[in-house]
Image: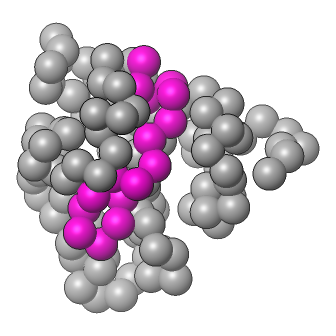
Amino acid sequence: MTLDAEIMFDQPDLTALLVKMDDATLDTLGFGVIGFDIEDRVRRYNTFESKAAGLGIERVLNQNLFTVVAPCMNNFLVAQRFADARETGMALDDTINYVLTLRMRPTKVKLRLLSDPMSELCYVLVQRI
């Protein structure tokens, strides 16, 4: 996919754009992208997030996001919102202030939680602040 303009963290309808992006385009984004399936297995993980988190892409792919990769997100603020969206069949597009705590000193971020019942993957976007 070729980008006509820079993709921003807070861009409307971002889920539809992410679905169409190949991995090379995903790696050009200026924020972290973690795409995971219905079993919470990471299927997409961009270079920005890999470098920022210090976790190699090969180490993260196919691992459970909430129990292996980022257990600090396994709570009602993040994981439960995705579970609720799936259960109700509703779309999710929430942005929250958050502090990542695993494998690093506490790091303030904004998380954008994206889930669309028409998409195979859900996404956690990570913007360091």
* Labels in figure, total: 0
Q: Position of residue 34 (x, y in %)?
A: 41, 46
Task: Pick whichever, 58 or 47, lies toward us.
Answer: 58
- Position above or below: 105 against 116: above
Relative to 74, 5 lies left or right: right
Q: Quadrant of the C terminus?
A: top left
Q: Nearer the viewer, residue 40 or 101?
A: 40
Residue 70 sits inside the magenta stretch: no
Residue 46 appears in view: yes
Residues in magenta, as a range:
36-51
Give the quadrant of residue 128.
Answer: top left
Can residue 78 be seen in the rendering of this structure? no
**Along the viewing direction, whichever of 14 and 66 lies nearer the viewer:** 66
Q: Is residue 39 magenta?
A: yes
Q: Residue drawn 30% across and 39% down?
A: 60
Q: Residue furthest top?
A: 105
